[in-house]
Amino acid sequence: MQASLSAIRPGASELEVDDAGRTAVLREAAKRYPNSVVHTQSITPSGVARSIMPHVFSTTRKLERGDVLIHTHHAVVHGYIAECERTCFVEEATERQKEAFAVMLRAQQAALETIKAGVPMREVDRAARAVIQAAGYGEYAIHRTGHSIGLDIHEPPFFRFDEEALLQEGMVFTVEPGFYVPELGGFRHSDTVIVTRDGCEPITHVPRDLVSMIRRA
C-alpha cells in the first residue's frame, strides 16, 4: 500500500499506481515467505466519475491534480487474503471533499469500536451507517459495511443490516463503510481485522488520516 501511495502524482496512470504496489508485495513476500505461493491484485479508480464506482478495473487514465481516488490492494499468501483500501487525493482536496472524508473516517471508527465477540453483526453496519446518515450521505451508502475474508475476497457472513449472527473470536473481516457522491467522489477506507473477545485487532497498518492521504509528489 505504501508503495502504491508513493506512486500517486499528476501524470501517473491508475495502472502505474497498481503496479508499484504489486511489485512491492512480490519483493517483500519473496523475502518473508520463501517457497510460498503469492498473489496480489489491486484497483485504483480515480476522478469524481470513476471513484464513485466501488469496483471497477484500473485503466490508463492519468491522475490529475485534485483527483480523488480509492486504491484497493489484496495480498494473498498460500490462498489466504488480506485487504486494505485508502481514499486519497492528488495534491489537494476541496473543503467539501475534506468534510466527506471526515465522515467516512468517523463511520469506519464507529464500526471498529462496535466489533467484539458476541455482538450481532448487523450492529456493526448500523453503527457506521448512523454516522453516514447523520451527515446527510445516507442515500449514497450503497453497500454493506464489511465482509468476511479468507480463501475468497468476499465471504459470508457480512456486516449487513439483516445479519443476525454473532461475532466470534478469530473471525476475520474487512471494515469498509463507504459512500459515493456524484460530482464529489467516492469515500472508502478498508482494513482487515481479527475479532477478539474485547474488540478487534487490525492487521493492515496504513495511515488513515487526511494529511497522510493528500498525496504530494
Image (cartoon, rainbow, N blue to C red):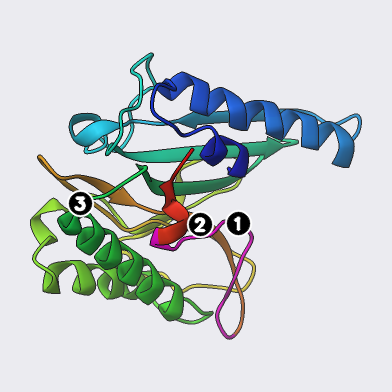
Residue bounds of the magenta highlight: 198-210
Pinpoint residue 126: horizontal percent, then vertical percent.
26, 72
Q: Quadrant of residue 185?
A: top left
Q: Which mark is residue 204?
A: 1
Q: Look at mark 2 in the image and give the residue it sits on.
A: 191
Left or right of 134 in this view: 155: right
Q: Residue furthest front?
A: 217
Q: Is residue 33 above or below residue 110?
A: above
Q: Is residue 104 above or below residue 134?
A: above
Dot 3 amino acid type: Thr
Question: Mark 1: few, some, or many residues within 10 Å (few <14, many ≥20)?
Answer: some
Pinpoint residue 112: horizontal percent, then vertical percent.
45, 73
Instruction: Give the label, 2 or 3, closer to the camera.
Output: 3
Q: Residue furthest right?
A: 34
Residue occupying image coordinates x 23% and y 68%: 129
Residue occupying image coordinates x 44% and y 45%: 215
Pinpoint residue 153: horizontal percent, then vertical percent.
51, 40
45, 62: nearer the viewer: 62
Q: Quadrant of residue 186?
A: top left
Confirm or deny contact between disc 2 and disc 1 (CB under 8 A): yes
Q: CA distance from mark 2 to mark 1?
A: 6 Å
User: Is residue 185 part of the magenta span, yes or no?
Assistant: no
Q: Look at mark 3 in the image and give the residue it sits on.
A: 94
Dot 2 amino acid type: Asp
